[in-house]
Amino acid sequence: MSSIKAIPQSGPLDLTSPRRPLLWAALAYAAGILVGSYAWRPPLWWVVAALAFLGASAYFISRRTWLAFPLALGALFLAGALAIQVHNSRPPSDDRVLDFSGDEEVLVTGHVIRDGTVRVAGFGGVRQSVDVATEQITRQEKTTEVRTGVRLAIYGKASDQEAEEDDARVRVFHYGERLLFTGKLHAPRNFGNPGAFDYKGYLAENKISLLGSAKKERVEVLPGFAGNRVERLRQQVHGSIVHRIHRLWKAEDAALMDAAVIGESAFLTPSMRLDFQRSGTYHILVVSGMNVSILAFVVFVVMRRMRLSELLASILTVALCTAYAFVTDVGPPVWRAVLMLTVYLGVRLVYRGRSMLNAVGAAALVVMAEDPKSLLGASFQLTFLSVWILGAIAAPVLERTSAPYVRGLRSLSSPDFDRTLAPRVAQMRLDLRMLTERLEGFFGEKASLAIVRAGAHATLSTYEVLCVATLMQAGLALPMAYYFHRATVMGIPANSLAVPLTGVLMPFAVSAVALSYLWSPLARIPALVAAASLHGITGTVRTLGGLRMADNRIAMPEPSTILISACALGLVMALVWKRRALALSGLALLGAMGLWVSAAVPSPHVLGGMLEVTAIDVGQGDSLLVVSPQGRTLLVDAGGPVGGQQTEFDFGENVVSPYLWERRISRLDAVAITHGHSDHRGGMHAVLNNFRPRELWVGALPQTPAIHDLMEFAKGLGIRVVSHVDGESFDFGGMRVSVFSPPETWQTSAQARNNDSLVLRLQYRESSALLEGDAEGVVERRMAASRELRSDLVKVGHHGSATSSTPEFMNAVHPHWAIISVGRGNRFGHPRMATLERLQEAGVATYRTDLHGAISFYLDGRSVTPQLACLR
C-alpha cells in the first residue's frame, strides 16, 4: 500500500496508456533469455541476427518509425538469448574439490566467511553452522592448496545446550577468523526427483561447493585475519542489530522481528513459517521489496515534511535504503528493490513520476544484463510481477476510483475548491460538510472537521488496501501455484490487515533499534508500538491461517494454464487503461484467471492401463508411489529422518509432495504406513494434509506418542484408518492387493520394529510387485514357507541390509527386477555388499535411489519396464 501512496498526487494519472519503451525493452530481453535457455544456437548466430535487426531498425527509424521500434525489440530479444547462453557456457567450478569428499577425515585450513549460528541439535547437543573459505586441505599427509567454500556443521555435546546464552561454553565463530579443523567433507546432493529443490545450485550461488562436519573439540582458532574488512564490518553490524532486537523483545517476538526487519531467519520455528505461509503473508517474514518500499516511503515523507528539497529527500532516501540493504544480508532481492527505487526516484525527478513502469523496465534491464539467470528465479519474477501489478493495474484502478476522492479531501472546509473538481467529488465534499455541521454541536467546528476528514481518509484507505490486496492475490496466483503450490484463499483478508500493520511495524521497529544504541529506556516506547503491531499481525495470521480452508495446496499448473495466464496478465494491463467498460472487463478477466489457477485440477501425469511403482528418492528412507491401471493412487510410506532425530526438515513437505505435485497429482486415493520407524512415517503428516487421501492403511503399529499423534491427525482430517493383516486380498483400481504380513496375531512392542512391516503384493494380470517395507529374515522365512511369493519386481527390504533379502526369500520371490531405497553415504553401510552379490548372482537387475534417483517401473500385465525419472 505504501508503494501506491508514493505515486505523486499532483494531477490525475494519464489513462491513455503512455508509451513505455524501457518496459517493452525489458520484456523483449526477458523473452530472449527464456528462449535462449531452451533453444541453443552458436553464439555467432545470435550476434549476426542481432546486428541485422539493429541495422534494420536504424534504417527504418526515419522512414518507417512504427517498424523501427519492433525491430529494435527484436535485437534486444536476440541479445537476451545470447546473454543466457554465454552465461551458461562459463566454466564450472574446480572439480578437484570433490576429491576430498568421502568418509575419510581431512585436515582443513580456512577462514570464516559467514558468522556462525548456534542451534540445539536433534541429538540434544548443539550445532553451529558456519561458512568457511578453504586455504588448504590435507589428506593422507598430502597438503593441497584449495580455494572453495564449505558449509561446516560443528557439533557440541549435550552438556553444551546453554550455548545460545553462554558464549563462554560454545565459541561462536565470526567473519575473518582463521580455523584449523579435522572433519569429513562431502559434496551436496539434490534429491533425485523431478520438482526437487536445487539445493546444490542454491549453495553454488552462495559460493559453497562442499558440506562438512566436525566435532567442537577438533576445531582450532588460528591467529590472524583473512577476508574483507568491509564485509567484516557489515556482519558485525548485522549481529549487533540482532542482539539489540533480542534485548528489546521477548524470544518469540524477537524471532519474528529478526525476519521481518533485518532478514535473519535463524530463529524462526517451522510452526511460525507454516502459519504465515498458509495465510498468504509469508512475504512479511522475508525482507523484500515491500520492506524497502515501506522504509523508503516513511523516510521520503519525513524528509519532505522537514522541508528538504525533493532532490535531497530522494538522495537521502536512496542512501538510507542502500544502507539497509547492506546490513540485511538478504542478497539480490533487496538490492533489486533498491535499484528499482533508485531508478524510479531518478525518473520521477525528470518526468514527475509519470513513468513508473518505464523506470521498472530500466531497473529490470540492468539486473538481467548483470545476471541473465536471475530472470529464471522465483525472487526476480515475483518482484517484477508485483511491481507490474502495482503500477500497471492497481495504479490506474485507484486513479479511476479512490484517487479523485482522496484529492477531494484537501481544503474540505473551502466551498470554492469544489468548482475545480468533478461533480461526484464535489458532491462528496458537500455531504461531508453537512455531516460536519451535524457534529459541531457535540465536538466543535475544528474537531468535527478533523473527525469527518479522518473517517473519510480511513474509509478510502481501507478500500485501497482491499483493492491492492485483491489485485495482488489474483495476479500472483500463477507464481504461487507454480513455485509454492499454494492457493492462499485467506490472502486477501490476511494481507488487508497485516500489510498496513507492517507499515506501522517497520518504522517503529527500526526507530526502537536505533534509539537503543543511544538510550535503552527511550527505545521502549517505539518497541511497544512495534510489538503491538506484530501481535496484530500474528493474531491475524494464526486466526486465518489456522482455518482448514486456508491450507489449499495445488499441483503444478499445466503448460497451457501458464501460457494463457501470462497472456491474460498482459491483456489486463492494456484494458485497465481504456474506457470504463473495457477496464471492468480486464478486472473480471484478472479475477477469473486467479480463480482458474487456484481451482483448476490438472490431469495427473500417469500412463493408463499399466501398474506403476515408483521409488521416490527420500534419502535413507522409503516412499513408493503406486498408480493402478485405472489411475487410482497409493503412496506407501513418506520418508523421514533416520532414528527419530529432531529436525526442521520435513520430508513429506519438501521431498515427497513436490514430486507428486510435479506429476500433477492433487489428491491421493490411499496412503500406507509399513511400520512405525521415522524414516518411513516421518513425512506422513504433510502428505496427509497436502493430499487428503480417503484411506490410511496400517499394519502392526505400536502405540507410541508419535504414532498416536499421527492417527489422531488423520482422523481429524476425516481420513479413514484401515488395518490390514496377513491373508487379506482386495481390488484397488484394477489391480489385486494381497497382504502377506503382519499376521493377525502379531504382537507389537513398546517401540517400532522392522518386522512390524506391512508387506503388500500388487498384481496386474500376469505381472506383480512385492513391497516388503523393512521386513527382516524372520518374517521373510515365514512368508516363504507359507505363501506364493513369486513376483517380477521386489522392493528390497530394509534398504538392502544384511538382515533382509535372505536366500530362502529371494528364491521364493525369484524377481527379475529389484529396487533399493537408500541414502547416499549413509552411516549404516546400506546396501550391504552381500545383498548386492546375492541379487547379482540371481540375475536380478537392481536399481538404487542413491545412484539413480526416482525410478519408475511399469507393469503392463506381461512384462516390467523401468524408467529413470531424469529421462522423462
Image (cartoon, rainbow, N blue to C red):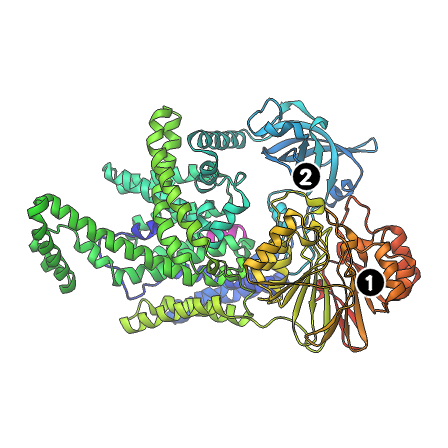
- Is residue 489 toward the left or the right of residue 164 in the image? left
Q: Say which quadrant the C terminus sits in.
A: bottom right
| Residue 727 position within the rendered picture, expressed as x and y whole percent measured from the top left | 78, 67
- Is residue 332 toward the left or the right of residue 396 in the image? right
User: Within 10 angstroms of label 1, few (less than 14), some, or many (20 or more) residues?
Assistant: some
Residue that badge 2 annotates: 148
Magenta segment: does it hold 216? no
Of badges 1 and 2, the one in the foreground is: 1
Tell me what residue is drawn at x 72 percent, y 36 percent: 146
Amino acid at pointer 1: Ala
- Is residue 584 toward the left or the right of residue 361 in the image? left
Helix, strand or loop: magenta stretch: helix
Outermost residue to the right: 841
Magenta segment: does it hold 370? yes
Amino acid at pointer 2: Thr
| Residue 267 position within the rendered picture, expressed as x and y whole percent measured from the top left | 53, 38
User: Within 10 angstroms of label 2, few (less than 14), some, or many (20 or more) residues?
Assistant: some
Say which of 83 and 560 sits in front. 560
| Residue 196 position within the rendered picture, expressed as x and y whole percent measured from the top left | 63, 56
Q: Is residue 408 above or below residue 285?
A: below
Q: Which mark is residue 23?
A: none
Residue that badge 1 annotates: 818
Label whose residue precedes the other's in the sequence (1 or 2): 2
Q: Which residues are magenta?
A: 364-371
